[in-house]
Image (tube, helix red, strand yellow):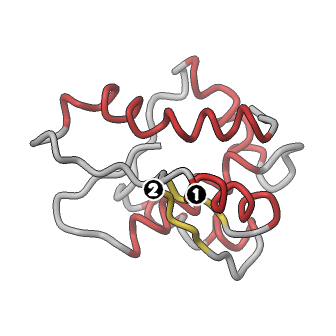
Amino acid sequence: MKLEFPALVNFIERFPEEIRDKYRQYFTNDCVQVETIIEDTSSGTAIIQFLQSKGIRVRPIKSETDKETRLTGITHLLENGTILLPNQQNGDLVDFFDELFKFPNSTFKDMVDSFSQGVRYIDDSYISGSRGYF
């Protein structure tokens, strides 16, 4: 799903509350913090600055390697069961799985790249009992 700047900003603004509502049953309290990470390059930098100027909590991240290297860096977490993926038949994730299974030869790579960066972020900032949802 490719979004233009205004639609992307709107999506990011709604994202934390939608995640809280969708996964509320898994939270142990109502004080759950939802963090939106955004790659601090090209259009991501502009989005970060715009959202922060509106007081929206986002965490900029820097990427120092290419998309393929980033995915390779988290495959052990998938292989050993630390990160579990939902059933492939989930209609909402058809495009994601298509991109994932064709990667790096897929036409689009943004969903897989976002996934690998999110997994890396959670793994790097792991706190016992923490969960990450994409």
Residue nearer the viewer, 13 or 25: 13
- Residue named by callout 2: 57
Residue nearer the viewer, 98 or 65: 65
Kind of element beneath mark 1: helix
Mark 2: give few (<14), some (14-19) or many (20+) Cα within 10 Å: some
What distance separates the C-alpha of mark 2 from that of mark 1? 10 Å
Residue nearer the viewer, 13 or 119: 13
Q: Amino acid at mark 1?
A: Ser
Residue 76 at what x, y percent from top left? 48, 68
Instruction: Using the image, determine if residue 37 lies above or below residue 21.
Output: below
Decide if residue 76 is on the left or right side of residue 93.
left
Residue at (67, 75) in percent of width and height = 63
Kind of element beneath mark 2: loop
Q: Residue furthest left?
A: 28
Residue at (39, 69) in percent of width and height = 123
Q: Residue furthest top?
A: 91
Decide if residue 91 is on the left or right side of residue 43.
left
- The quarter of the image holding the N terminus is top right
Decide if residue 111 is on the left or right side of residue 75.
right
Residue 47 at what x, y percent from top left? 69, 54
- Residue named by callout 1: 53
Q: Amino acid at mark 2?
A: Arg
Q: Residue furthest bottom?
A: 64
Mark 1: give few (<14), some (14-19) or many (20+) Cα within 10 Å: few
Mark 2–mark 1 contact, CB under 8 Å?
Answer: no
Residue at (46, 59) in percent of width and height = 79
Give me the disc on residue 108: none
Numbered label tally = 2
Residue 5 at what x, y percent from top left? 78, 41
Residue 48 sits in quarter: bottom right
Residue 78 at what x, y percent from top left? 46, 57
